[in-house]
Structures are given as structure tokens and as C-alpha cells.
Amino acid sequence: MPPQAEEWTFEIPEACLCLANPGSVGQPRDGDPRAAYALFSEEEGLLRYRRVRYDVEAAQAKIRAAGLPPSLADRLAEGK
């Protein structure tokens, strides 16, 4: 996805086998701390990747409260 985009749409060619990995809410590795997900419409032949903001600070607090390594909490804000 382009940086800071909220949605990116791909047209899937008919009879094409594809693998999609939208990412996750957890430990992102692409420099974008927002949650990632994808929606596929078989009828339209479209795959829509989406990014949404979530409360990173609350997630970090829960990671720290659970006694997990601080680096896991720190990286959420950076998306790395």
C-alpha cells in the first residue's frame, strides 16, 4: 500500500490463483503502525487492503503490564 493510504484496491484477474497477506494488528513490520486487513469480493474480482488507526498507547500499556519485553511495546508505535 502507498504510505498513509487508507485503502488500496487490486483487481484480481479471472482464473488467477493469488495469496494475500494483509498484515495484522500486532507486530507490524512495514513501518505503518495502523491495523491492516483485507476484504475480497469474488463477485467484483477485487481485493481491498485497508488500514485503520487503533489505540497504540493502550496496546503498549497492556504489553508492558503483561511483563512482556519492552521492545514489543515500543515497536508498535513505529510499525517496525
Image (tube, rainbow, N blue to C red):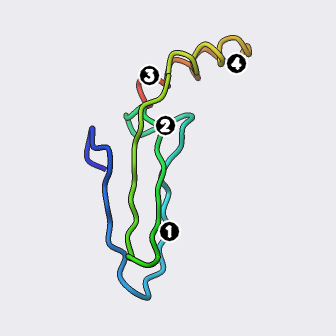
Q: CA distance from mark 2 to mark 3?
A: 9 Å
Q: CA distance from mark 3 to mark 4?
A: 16 Å
Q: Are marks 4 and 2 in contact (CB under 8 Å)?
A: no
Pointer 3: what residue? 77
Mark 2: which amino acid? Pro
Q: Is disc 1 surrounded by few (<14), some (14 to 19) or many (20+) residues within 10 Å?
A: few
Q: Is disc 4 surrounded by few (<14), some (14 to 19) or many (20+) residues within 10 Å?
A: few
Q: Is residue 48 left or right of residue 35?
A: left
Q: CA distance from mark 4 to mark 1?
A: 32 Å
Q: Nearer the viewer, residue 1 or 39?
A: 39
Pointer 4: what residue? 68
Mark 3: secondary structure:
helix
Pointer 2: what residue? 28
Residue 67: x and y in percent read 73, 13
Of labels 4 and 1, earlier in sequence is 1
Mark 3: which amino acid? Ala
Residue 80: x and y in percent read 44, 31
Q: Nearer the viewer, residue 77 or 29?
A: 77
Q: CA distance from mark 3 to mark 1?
A: 28 Å
Mark 4: which amino acid? Leu
Residue 3: x and y in percent read 26, 41
Q: Residue at x 50, y 57 (%)?
A: 21
Mark 2: secondary structure:
loop
Of labels 3 and 4, earlier in sequence is 4
Residue 50: x and y in percent read 39, 49
Task: Look at the picture and state if 16 lies above or below 53.
Answer: below
Q: Residue at x 57, y 34 (%)?
A: 26
Mark 1: secondary structure:
loop
Of labels 4 and 2, earlier in sequence is 2
